[in-house]
Amino acid sequence: MVAGFHGAVLGLGEAARGTVSALASVGVATRAWDVSEQLGHARRLDHGDTAAPAAGPGVMIAHMNPPELIQLIATDPTPFEGKRVIGYWAWELPAVPALWKPAFRYVDEIWTPSRFTADAVRRAAPRRMTVRVAPHPVPVSDGSPDRTRFGLDPDRVVVLCAFDLRSTLARKNPLAALEAFRLATARTRRGAILVFKTVGGAENPAALAGLRTAVGGAADVVLIDEALSAADRDRLLASCDILLSLHRSEGFGLLLAEAMAAGKAVVATAWSGNLDFMDDQTGVLVPYTLIPVDDPQGLYRGGLWAQANVAVAGRALAELIDDDERRKAMGLRAQALVQERLALPVVGETMRQALQGRTLSPSSGPNDAQGPTHDV
């Protein structure tokens, strides 16, 4: 059983759906329990069963962070009774919040999407608790470019910066992306356009208004805040040439990996979870300085995160805008790496081994070991 936000338009929902797909790809019988509405999120997708499972033996992967897990168990602990409970947790800072601590007693082990998050969880976990890295699977999208759908000039290089405002404007740092784009276009020969694709504006209108003010009336910047279908989301990604992410921190960086899987050049901050699947051959890693966390939206507090070097990012972005062949070559290398490390069956096998209490090394391949004692 994989409990999560299967029916919600959230990054956590996409990750939970990916876990189900990865396990199914290696033959692990898996059921999805959608807890979106129970935890305050609209069910917009027809994924998962909303009926709670019965108590009894089995494996429960709780694909949600500790505050939501605690809330769910407080509402009704029955579905968790008698089961081996695996918490799948993601976090974007080197230390997890203190309020996570009570959740350790509700889980038997923890999975995280990256080494960065695993290290943060281990610092807080009980001494003997197992913490494993089980990355998000990243299938290759079959979306086709459709610039007409989004009103994008077919002759310009399209730079995409996409993010969820509920994950805070400060962490996603689009204003740095805007500055880097302006520095780049001041020195390029080719015309370019920057596309900001946001979600969560209704929940954070002040953050969205701040972004609109920063963009102003710039003719070469487009802001898309409409909800997109999965097909349109894939079309938008296919329609861009470069993905730009000057994030201050990522627990994994799923969109970055998805862009790489789509064969796109990626320019991103050289810090946090994305380093599990990015290097200087498969993307442009922007140097940074660690600075104190300052998040006006209040989700992240304390510690340090990264401030990308905007001048370096601008120069790198300009070079990619002007060099079609370099972009294409980088995208192909990125696509090959993602297929090697993050394809559904590769991640599914890592998860299957973890269910058996084993850790699959990066050089290992699928084997004929038996699956878990109980369905997931």
Image (tube, grey):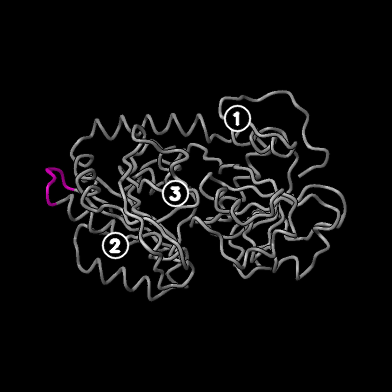
Nearer the observer, disc 2 or disc 3? 3
Residue 169's disc number: none
Q: Within the magenta stretch, is there residue 34?
A: no
Disc with the residue nearer the chain's start (2 vs 3)? 2
Q: Quadrant of the C terminus?
A: top right
Residue 175's disc number: 2
Q: Position of residue 358 (x, y in %)?
A: 70, 34
Rounded to the nearest whole Å, what is the CA distance between mark 3 and mark 1?
21 Å
Residue 322 vs residue 371: left or right? left
Q: Element at badge 2? A: helix
The residue type indicated by label 3 comes to Ser
Disc with the residue nearer the chain's start (3 vs 1)? 3
Q: Element at badge 3? A: loop
Judged by its main secondary structure, the magenta piece is: loop
Nearer the observer, disc 2 or disc 1? 1
Q: Within the magenta stretch, is there residue 187?
A: yes
Residue 272's disc number: 3
Kindly identify the residue that appears in the image at 21 percent across and 46 percent down: 156
Q: Residues within 10 Å of mark 1 (few under 14, many from 20)?
A: few
Rounded to the nearest whole Å, what is the CA distance between mark 2 and mark 3?
19 Å
In the image, the segment drawn in magenta is 186-191
Q: Position of residue 172 (x, y in %)?
A: 39, 59
Judging depth in this view, the residue of 36 and 172 nearest the camera is: 172
Marks 2,3: beta carbons within 8 A: no
